[in-house]
Amino acid sequence: MKLNNFRERHFARGRNRTLHLIIIAFFIMLILAILVLCSIAVNKRFGNKVIPADSSVAGPSSENQDAPREPSEEDPVLALLSKAEALASQYDYDGAISLLKSDASVAARDEITSAIAGYETAKAALVRINPQDVTHVFFHSLIMDNSKAFDGDKKQAGYNQMMTTKSEFLKIMQSMYDRGYVLVKLHDLAYETTDENGNPKFTYGDIMLPEGKKAFVLSQDDVCYYEYMKGDGFASRIIIGEDGYPTCEMEMDDGSVAVGDYDLVPILESFIKTHPGFSYKGARGILALTGYNGIFGYRTDEAYKDTNPNYEEDRRQAAAVAQALKDHGWELASHSWGHRNMGAISMEHFKTDCDKWARNVGTLIGPTDIILFPFGSDIGSWTPYTDDNERFTYLKSLGFRYFCNVDASKTTWMQMGTDYFRQARRNLDGYRMYYYPDSLKDLMNVPDVFDPERPTPVPPM
């Protein structure tokens, strides 16, 4: 009897133990199944994103909360705000506001309305710049390698007088930026319109900048990379970079060709990317072109037709570069075809030169209404142009309306007629910095800028 009772109790305990193990196993499997289902749900909701260890994933607190987006999906509101800020950073508040109001589907979003309010406030604080206070500075090709430009040969004196080194240019731009200067287009200063009778007339523009800012125009002469400059430490030509922006090529000592910031155009582009407030509504400089050696480093003149095996391709590439420059805000101008003193040569020679420029350069770059006179010359005295001036009327018949000479003795000089606009320019080169540093004190402290590798004394003109 006792033995039987013992066996029954033993078997009962065994059955209970087995039942407990089955129950435990069931719950373990149930928990695993729940974890698997949760994992699948999370993957469906968030994709394969890696969630940082210190992050928490919480469900939406309301039906209006934005659902998580795929990493590659661009937020249209953020994209719109970013484009608007790019415009506002260059004082185009009207453009920024118009852009933000253009998409009715997001116009009521708090981020949009807040940005618009901020731009309206900033716009209201702008003040009009007096166009007659706007200075115009200019450069030639920048020296990239001082050791080659200043190597003691017969060309050194000219480079020392008329050129600016890369180091000097960067310091000048930084100094002007620090002093509140903002780059504007020549067409921002004055533009052609019509009077109440439909007759053409010029009027000053409305340049609106924050209080304390000052406007300036910039130009570069001889953007042709002449044959005589080869091997002297300058860029060799302008090309269109992989990003679509104009940049430069430069030949290295080993015969290879490097691409980068090797002259004023790409250097200024890089500076403005870093300091967008240095440009008014996307303004860049004016590039003045002769024609006798071609343009932008391409041998495009008709004189090369039989000697340049790449003549047609050079013309095609030069035209493409011209369009890319204009697309990025650069203005193109005549510098005469043969780099002539346009006020001193005979009228016959004057017309021949103008016609050659139109045929060899104008056909590649498209219409322009700007001429920057070589040698700082002019086609008349300081008195206003009139139709009695045969050179003026001939240039006007070719479409020119903006005429720039050189007078570095003044910080600003301009003259507006009914059908033209004139402005004097200031050369920021070795000669000006060495002999007349005080004339540039509104722009820079010359001792801080002057390149110590520049040979002194700078040869007098």
Image: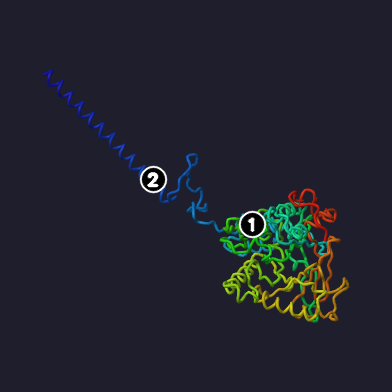
Looking at the image, which residue is at 67% across and 66% down? 227
Q: Nearer the viewer, residue 281 or 427?
A: 427
Left-right relation of 420 to 233: right
Say if 16 sits above or below 181 in the image. above
Based on the displayed image, in which of its 4 quarters is residue 79 positioned? bottom right
Of callouts 1 and 2, the N-terminal one: 2
Residue 2 x/y as whole percent: 13, 18
Q: Which residue lies furthest to the top in this view?
A: 2
Label 1 or label 2, whichever lies nearer to me, is 1
Query: Where does label 2 land, which residue?
Result: 39
> Is disc 2 surrounded by few (<14), some (14 to 19) or many (20+) residues within 10 Å?
few
Helix, strand or loop under label 2: helix
Residue 10 x/y as whole percent: 18, 23
Residue type, mark 2 in image = Ser
Q: Quadrant of the C terminus?
A: bottom right
Looking at the image, which residue is at 63% across and 64% down? 238
